[in-house]
Amino acid sequence: MKKLGSRPHPSASHSLFQRVYALVRRVPRGRVVTYGEVARALGMPRGARTVGWAMHACQDANVPWHRVVNAQGKISPRPTACFQEQHVRLKEEGIRFSRAGRIDLAKYGWKRI
DNA sequence: CGTTGGGCTCACC
DNA sequence: TGGTGAGCCCAAC
């Protein structure tokens, strides 16, 4: 018997990436979610890295990629310029960063995910 | 059709 | 608070 684990949509017409984008699009201004939360919401409890890669590949301007941070409440470090852009965008939305560069997920985390 | 690697996470020091 | 190290998933090659 093969057990494939929890798959929300065995016959998803859209790719996983598209489902990631659809979910992230719902994150409201001034709120953030973590890669792991998005992954779990889509039925992949351990697919956080895949979500990260999906965001990396995202070219849809309607997807607020900057509202996705890591489980520590920090912007995932990467050698590209969008690292700083993410910080700027979040601050513009009113999100506060601790001196260590962390976001209070209890306060700014999107509760509806 | 096997490998690779990425905006990750979690469990431990 | 910070650093490792080992899993994990999926699209690209």
Image (tube, coloured by chain):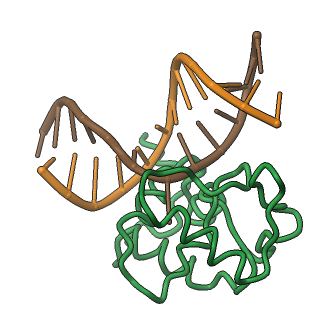
Chain colours: A green, B brown, C orange
Marks counted in the figure total: 0
User: Outermost residue, bottom direction?
Assistant: A62
Q: Which of A35/A44 is in front?
A: A35
Q: Quadrant of residue A11?
A: bottom left
Residue A81: where, in percent of width, then height?
44, 64
Q: Which of A17/A2 is in front?
A: A17
Q: Residue at x 40, y 69 (%)?
A: A17
Q: Which of A21/A75 is in front?
A: A75
Q: Quadrant of the N terminus of chain A?
A: top left
User: Outermost residue, right direction?
Assistant: A107
Residue A53: where, in percent of width, then height?
41, 57
Q: Quadrant of residue A26?
A: bottom right
Residue A94 placement, left or right of A33: right
Residue A100: where, in percent of width, then height?
78, 49
Q: Quadrant of the C terminus of chain A?
A: bottom right
Q: Residue at x 73, y 83 (%)?
A: A93
Q: Is residue A112 above or below residue C1?
A: below
**Residue A48 shows in the view:** no
Q: Quadrant of residue B13?
A: top right
Residue A37: where, in percent of width, then height?
66, 60
Q: Residue at x 54, y 54 (%)?
A: A44
Q: Is residue A108 above or below residue A73?
A: below
Q: Residue at x 46, y 75 (%)?
A: A19
**Residue A52 shows in the view:** yes
Residue A67 placement, left or right of C9: right
